[in-house]
Each structure stands twice: as structure tokens, then as C-alpha cells.
Image (spheres, helix red, strand yellow):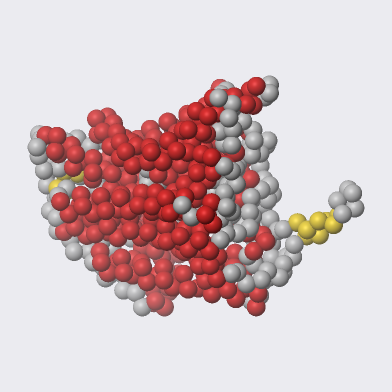
Amino acid sequence: MTTIGWIQILLFCAIIVALAPLLGAYMTRVFSGERTFLSPVLRPVEAVIYWLGGVDEKREQHWLTYTIAMLLFHVGGFLILYALMRLQASLPFNPAEQSNVAPDLAFNTAVSFITNTNWQNYGGEGTMSYLTQMLGLTHQNFLSAATGIVLAVALIRGFARASAKTVGNFWIDITRCTLYILLPICIVYTIFLVWQGMPQTLGAYVEATTLEGAKQTIAVGPVASQVAIKMLGTNGGGFFNANAAHPFENPTALSNFIQMLSIFVLGAALTNVFGRMVGNQRQGWAILAVMGILFIAGVAVCYWAEAHGTETLNALGLTGGNMEGKEVRFGIVASALFAVITTAASCGAVNAMHDSFTALGGMIPLINMQLGEIIIGGVGAGLYGMLLFVILTIFIAGLMVGRTPEYVGKKIEAKEVKMAMLAILAMPLMMLGWTAVAAVNPQALTQLGNAGPHGFSEMLYLYVSSTANNGSAFGGITANTMFFNITGAVAMFVGRFFMIIPAMAIAGSLAEKKSVAASSGTFPTTGGLFIGLTVGVILVVGGLTFFPALALGPIVEHLAMQANTVF
């Protein structure tokens, strides 16, 4: 661990904190329907979209109507993406002549991209045509990210409104999110990435001759446009199989740093949107503080573990830390920081192979996802996931003092707590349940790349990443099989929508309630006590749920490493 390394980490945190209120103010204006600096250009486009879609701007939706609209929207997205993959050999923009994608892999991938998971059981440059990458995957990167954001905004409206029957209009929200937020940023972002050296072309793969005279095919394509939204929308689906470790997908140290910032920036800004919309920005800062504490703790452990290396490496005189599976151009600090960011934010992009991390270094990405992707989390999903834990925290605080719990002027009652617990418990059911099934399935066990606890971690990571809608891979495991494709798709679907539906039910319930004024007995939710209690509740729930699984994987692997036993 070095001073320069910590300066880089602190600089990253400082920039995120500085950008959160700036972008939060803009996003609040967008979702409030107020005029922005882009309105003169985009407002006519927005109006045409509503006219073509038959959308009435003045008509809002009940939470159930809002949710059904969102689900139908995703059904359409699934069918389009599945058809593109199954028919891509017959479609244009396929210079590498990629064949049709197998049915089970197409099913897994379509579910993956509509759920903002972007788990990839395929090699991008060796499987997908340009048309599938652009019209299918990049298209869903925008829409799945926008969906997460607007659902968080709908939940915020539930807290902010009083005696209301509606939480917004899904079609209006998703249009404004895509048109005013995601597209403008990604256009600028794409130009920056091209400037850094990232390909953006519809030309054929490049044939090159090596110094030995051999022929080599170098994959290119419309890379920059996909990478921009993959990072900004916390999607993570890479154009290339090596993802952000590929020099065409992450060319420079500057592109690496900007990509890390873009993963966090919208999620952090949404906490400020929450504070602004409920009328107290300190509420948003308190939520961001909870996220920040968990994030810094994870970075410290992961960075320390990778900088310390392993006993086996140290015995060989390799005392510079664990560089296995890492890009030399990024080094240990940028690799460890990227790993924690991408798994804290439900992104799934990787610039190093997590399978090659030390036992404790690899455990932190696992924990980030097991906590529910609430440490910034996926755009939107991180905020509404965190608000579920806030509801649980407020409920526990109310039990301690014998009062009806309140949060930002709304009484938290049995319905909200039940819905929050339903959403929170759905994720470990998929993560641990499918891991248990795979652990006794001989066919699944043959796909592991390593024996012992490390092999168990590979399998656990697959279902944790899928359910948490992260999409990053631990590596080592061969997951493109019928069993993993189908069970992984089920985990992704449940992890996304079984959290969304209860969260939207909470939004509708809260919106209908009257706001109550704070009293002397109201638990303050902007101070250190609330922040500490929320962090404690998250860690206790996560520890009680996942410690046994972690003990079978990374923890026992670390203990074995101390005895010079490696896997």
C-alpha cells in the first residue's frame, strides 16, 4: 500500500462527492418536468415521442399501473433481443459472419441485458455481430439503466408526496431519463473514449501480420458507444470478452479513471435527488455517507489484501503484492479500486480477473454484491435497495423506543416493513439456493476451474453476481452450459423484479399517506447515530445470511493459504 495509491482513492471519492449535488440538481429538474439548458433542443423531440406513443404528459399512473407498464416494456425488450441473437447470421452488419446464438445462451443473455445484469456466458467479439451489439445489447444498456433510475424516482415520489394516488408516469419518466440524461452524457463520453484510442467503426475485423509472419485477426467494431453506456448505466457488458482489461475497451490510465467515475456518478447523484425531492438535502447526504463508509471499508481490505500478496508469492521473493491476473498498466491500486467499484455499483465490468485475487481480496467483491448492491449500487437500483434497508433500520429503531417509526415525514408501518423484507430475502434465496443445487450437481461441478474452496467461490460468485444483477465473473468456471444458462437466468430475473415490485408497492403505500411533522420523539435521520445504525443493520443482516457460505469459500481458503496450501 502506498501514499500515491491512497491519494488516487481519495481523489476518486472527492470527485464523486463534488459531482453528486451538481448532477443531482439537474436530474431533479428533469424528473420534475422543469426547463433545463437542453430543453430548447430536446423538448420538441420529447413531444414527438409522446405523440407517436400516444402518451398524455398530464396523466400520471398508480404504482401498479406504473409497474405493469415497466414489466410489459421489458417483455418487448426481451423478445427483440432474443430474436436478434437467434437470427443474427441472416441479418446485416455482421462482417465476421457470426452464426446464430444457441437458444439457451440467447435466453440467458436476453434476460441478462433486460435486468441490467449483463452477465456474459459468451465472448463478445467471437459471438455477437455488430447489429446485435448495437441494436440489441447497447440498446438494452440504455433502457435497463433508465428503468432503474425512474423506479428509484418513483419511490422517492412516494416519500415526497402526501395523500397522492400516483407516483408518476413510466413512459414519461423513461423518455426524459434517456433523452435528457443518458444520451447527452454518452455522446460526449463516446467522443472522449475515441480520443483515448477506443475503436468506433462498422468496418471489418483487421488482418495483421506479426513479426514472425503469421496472420492475426484483430477484432474491432462500434466499441466506444457501447462502453460509454455500459459504464454510465452500470451495465458492464463488454464488447470484448476481456472487458475493461482489453486495451481497446480501456486504452489508458485516464480512460480507466474516468470509467470508474462514470460507474458511480449517477448512483451517487440519485442520493442528492432524494434529498432535494423530500425537501431536505441532508437526508440524501446521510444515505450517501452510509454507502461511503461501506465502500471505503471494502476498498481498504481489498487494497491491503492485494498489496500484501500471498504467503506463497512472498516465499518466492515476490513481495510487491499480487499482480496475477492484473494489467501492468493499471497496477494493484487501480485494479483493486476498480474491483470494489464495479461490484459495489452493480456494473460488472472488470479490468482485472477476480479469480486471481487473493482469498480476502476476492471476498470483498462477493460481499459487496451479497449486501444487495446497495453501496451506490446499480443506477437507481442502489438507491431503492438502500431505502429498503433504511425502512428496516427505522423499524428497528422504533422498536427500541416503543414508537411508530417515521422517516422523512412518513410513518413506516407493517406493510412497508413486510414489503422491504420480501425484497431483501428474495436475493439470498437465489444466491444460496442455486449454489446449493449446483454443489450437488455432478455436471455443474465438472465446469469448475479449481478444486476446494476456490472452486466453491467460483460457483457462489456466479449466482451472487447473477442475482445481484452485477454481471461480473469470478472467472475459472465454464458457465456456458444448459444448467448454468437457465438457472443463472432465473436468478437474474428474480434478483431484479422481486426487488422492484415490493419497492413499487412501498412507493404507492407511502404516497397515499399524509406527511407528519417531526416531533421531539422523532428519530433524527441525518446524523451519525442514524448512519451508524443503518451500517450496523446492513452488516448484521448480511453477516447472518452469508457468513456460512463465505466460511466455506474465501475464508477457509485464506486460512489454508497461511499454511501454504493453494488451490
- Residue 346: tell me if it is visible: no
Please state, as top left, top right, bottom left or bottom right, where the N terminus lies in the image.
Answer: top right
Q: Nearer the viewer, residue 185 or 426?
A: 426
Where 318 sits versus 273, above or below? Answer: above
Please give the name of the residue rendered at 51% of the width and 58% of the height, measured from the top-left corner. Answer: 484
Where 321 sits versus 375, above or below? Answer: above
Please state, as top left, top right, bottom left or bottom right, where the C terminus lies in the image.
Answer: top right
Q: Residue 414 location, x and y as percent?
A: 15, 51
Image position of 155 (left or right of 228): left
- Residue 535: tell me if it is visible: yes
Image position of 162 (left or right of 208): left
Please give the name of the residue rendered at 28% of the width and 48% of the height, measured from the top-left corner. Answer: 388
Query: For residue 56, which quarter of the picture?
Result: bottom left
Please give the name of the residue rendered at 59% of the width and 64% of the height, measured from the top-left corner. Answer: 133
Where 428 sits versus 38, above or below? Answer: above
Q: Which of 420 and 180 is in front in this view?
A: 420
Q: Nearer the viewer, residue 527 or 315?
A: 315
Q: Residue 491 location, x and y as percent?
A: 42, 57
Q: Residue furthest right?
A: 213
Query: For residue 318, which quarter of the picture?
Result: top right
Q: Residue 140 location, x and y as percent?
A: 49, 64
Please give the name of the residue rendered at 55% of the width and 24% of the height, measured from the top-left corner. Answer: 563
Image position of 542 (left or right of 93): left
Query: For residue 474, which quarter of the picture?
Result: top right
Q: Residue 328 location, x and y as percent?
A: 68, 35
Q: How many marks?
A: 0
